Amino acid sequence: MGKLNPQNLSRGDKIRIGLLILVLILPFFPFISDYMLHIIILIFLYMILALGLNIVPGFNGLLDLGYVGFYGIGAYTSGLLTFHFGLSYWVIIPLAFMNGAIWGILLGAPTLRLTGDYFAIVTFGFSELVVLFLTNEIWLTRGPLGLPGIAPPSIDLSLFGGPKWEFVGELPYYYLAIVMVLITVFVMHRIQDSRLGRAWFAIRDDETAAVSCGINLLNYKVIAFAISAAFGAVGGSFFARWVTFLSPDMFKFWESFLVLCMIVLGGMGNIWGVMIGAVVLVSLSEVLRELLPLLGLPVNVRFLAFGLIMVLMMRFRPAGLMPIPAVAAKMKAGQVKRKRGPATAELKTGLKK
Amino acid sequence: MTPILDIKNLSKNFGGLKALQDISFRIDPGEIIGLIGPNGAGKTTLFNCVAGVEKPTQGQIIFSHKNSSISVGGKKPEKITSFGIARTFQNIRLFDNLTVLDNVKIGRHCRFKSTFFGAVARTRGQQVEEKAITESSQQYLEFVGLKGRGEEIASSMPYGDQRRLEIARALATEPQLLMLDEPAAGMNPMESRDLMVLIQRIREKGVTILLIEHDMKVVMGVCDRVVVINHGEWLTEGKPKDVQNDPKVIEAYLGSGAANAA
């Protein structure tokens, strides 16, 4: 295990390990309130969602506007299985993962032949369909009344003669969320450096060339969509057992947009960038929620602020806060070209005259 | 000897436009065939039909390798690549944002099979496979003369090197037949001389080559045989020298007056 030798660690690894230790001991700092823990858990949850969504636009270059549909499916899978059958959360996680993947395949297989905007519209339609289903199929979901009283997760060791812990307060959820984020990051990392990941990057860069290398576009896009959906559903399953109440209007289009913004803001295709996007947007949302009423503005003005941030990002850092190196290089080259473009050329010829 | 590629009465229409009409020719294993013709003659359309990007309207394309014959006409392009036909593109199509090495690794894609679960669990089989992919990709880079440049970003390389990289990527799919679409376009005389050497070396590896090229020096220098098409129709074929002096070919390129003058 030479890898764990501190001398062999790169600067980036040191920062990551430092951050992880900080995050692990964070709840014990005196200034951390339950409310703050709640927000941090929310950040973790959105990290899982953003990492999951990132596969589709970040790795494959397909615009997905309906991610919240899979989040909703996962949440209701978790909620209903708990409500009706009292299943343990540890059993529900793989079930939610599979259910998300199944719906990803069902939606993706027929529609991923579409390109660009057309595909985006279909995904958008799907997420609206999910909300309508959750609202109207009252026999299953109780409709707009929502699904209250979902039992929190617990660690039950009574089978082995051990004790049974129920999740009380934010702290257990906090550590559960950290574990889930770590697993998600781990999986994404492994995929990124694999044959599967390379096939996705090939599709993102040039579909025609990817095909000529023997990559079956539809198969790989469906795999991407399914895995992305599965992580969305896992995020949803956590959400259900954490807030212990579900209603259809929690899964409106706005959520898809927010997660997409995190990816664009952080740097599409970059695992760390996407996580930073989640940190920035969730905390900003909370800060604005507190700040705006003080300024006498309605809380929903924060949506305007998000829009403004996106416009500014497009102008100044189009590749995101932490772009993947190649994209960063390209954007930089583009900017240099623009700066030395016609304007300066004219200036030079003008000077010569 | 069975030809490696046998094109029989191939036609391709785009609506009313007859891009290819009743074209037939054969390529023997180990040959370097030049496909020439004036602009708009249908050379790239023919390539696309063989590569599976376009579906032929009529006719057959038979690819034979190791005693088995496959009709590739109308098959999916990724299937055709796995049969053993690789191609490069007229305007270079690399994976611009990826490294040089990754570009070649993606070329190796169709010869391996690890998936999501292998990638996440990093099983023994997957590790062995990944190592094999990297090592063989390095070899292909070395073969085309890009050794030690695997970490560069593909789009940042000079034009001639990008062409070489595209050829390396095509070779990485382990083709029996390699189709090069204007590989010398935009190259200076030095670069195209190097390219000719490279093409010869690829043939020495046992790969048959079909080449579209406008640079007559390259065509004359490397091709064993030349097929000329004009207005989507087969015009003539033969040894480069004979074709070069064929009045029909001169007429096709320069018009009927020129043929008389010659």
Image (spheres, coloured by chain):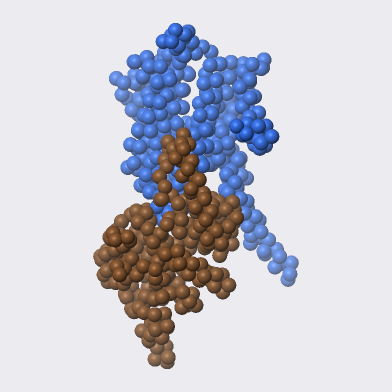
Chain colours: A blue, B brown
Seen from the viewer's position, the closer of residues A282 and A160 is: A160
Number of numbered discs present?
A: 0
Seen from the viewer's position, the closer of residues A66 and B31 is: B31
* Residue B200 seen by the camera: yes
Residue A293: image location, x then y, percent: 60, 23
Q: Who's the residue at 42% across and 42% down the image?
A: B114
Q: Against A28, is B221 above or below?
A: below
Residue B69: image location, x then y, percent: 28, 60
Quadrant for the N terminus of chain A in the image: top right
Instruction: Tell me: A132 left or right of B106.
Output: left
Instruction: Tell me: A126 left or right of A43.
Output: left
Q: Against B227, is A303 above or below?
A: above
Quadrant for the C terminus of chain A in the image: bottom right
* Residue A261 seen by the camera: no
Q: Quadrant of residue B205?
A: bottom left
Residue B55: image location, x then y, percent: 30, 60
Q: Who's the residue at 74% across and 67% down the image?
A: A351
Seen from the viewer's position, the closer of residues B30 and A88 is: B30
Q: Quadrant of residue A298?
A: top right
The residue lying furthest to the bottom in this view is B261
Q: Who's the residue at 36% across and 19% down the image?
A: A81
Q: Against A320, is A19 above or below?
A: above
Q: Against A297, is B188 above or below?
A: below
Instruction: Tell me: A28 left or right of B32.
Output: right
Residue B244: image location, x then y, percent: 42, 83
Q: Who's the residue at 65% across and 35% down the image?
A: A9
